[in-house]
Amino acid sequence: MKKNVIITVLLTCCISVAFGQKYLTRTGQITFFSSTPLENIEARNNEVAAIVSQQGDIVFQAPIKSFKFQKELMQEHFNEEYMESDKYPKADFKGKIDNLSSVNFSKDGNYNVKVTGKLTIHGVTKDVSEPGTIIIKGNDITVNSKFSVATVDYNIKIPALMAGKIAKSIEVTVNCILSAVK
């Protein structure tokens, strides 16, 4: 037991040194929206883990089964048929803030950023580069971004019967409030 506590403390210290000042959440939010003439589909996930460091490292991880839908049947189809969430239980992004010099972590304000990295969904990893905003207020930062994900890019198969009800490109919105870790 003591050995596990010591290892955990050492890992936490190493991560703090490697990342410098960092910000963390386990309750970030990602929503997605699919709009077609036949049906709109929206889901929300409030269990997103995220970390941002002042060195520009940024990581997000979303458990797929944590996306909640208005209709229970949509959620079931999403997990079993489209996302195969037992086989691919999470989506994640690992990247860097490209224009880090434009962000002053010690001054409250809104900062436009561009983030580049690798997005993994449904077992497929793609290079992505997307705009976003970092809002700094006291010891917290808010990270916002809105971008589109093409289902075909991540081998998410939409049956012909459902093609008119699910958009080929899904709008993803990220809104995470992270607190400084000391």
Image (cartoon, helix red, strand yellow):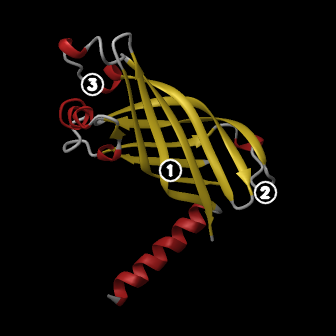
Q: Are marks 2 and 3 in contact (CB under 8 Å)?
A: no
Per the image, the residue denoted by label 3 is: 155
CA–CA distance between discs 2 and 3?
42 Å
Residue, disc 1: 28
Query: Which residue corresponds to the image point at 52% horizontal and 27% vertical from the top-left?
Result: 147
Q: Which residue is mark 2?
A: 106
* Image spot of residue 7 (x, y percent): 40, 79
Check the image and report above or below for 113 versus 141: above
Tell me where residue 163 sits by quadrant: top left
Bin the neighbour count of mark 1 within 10 Å (Cα to Cα): few under 14, some 14-19, many 20 and up. Answer: many
- Mark 2 lies on a secondary structure that is loop
User: Where is residue 81 drawn, in percent x and y?
Assistant: 18, 31
Q: CA distance from mark 1 to mark 2?
A: 22 Å
Between the residue at mark 1 and the residue at mark 3, the CA separation in whole angstroms equals: 26 Å
Residue 53 pos. (x, y %): 61, 55
Q: Percent from the top left, x then y, of residue 117?
A: 50, 37
Given this view, does label 1 or label 3 mark the residue nearer the observer?
A: 1
Give the residue at x 37% y 37%: 120
Q: Nearer the viewer, residue 83 or 18?
A: 83
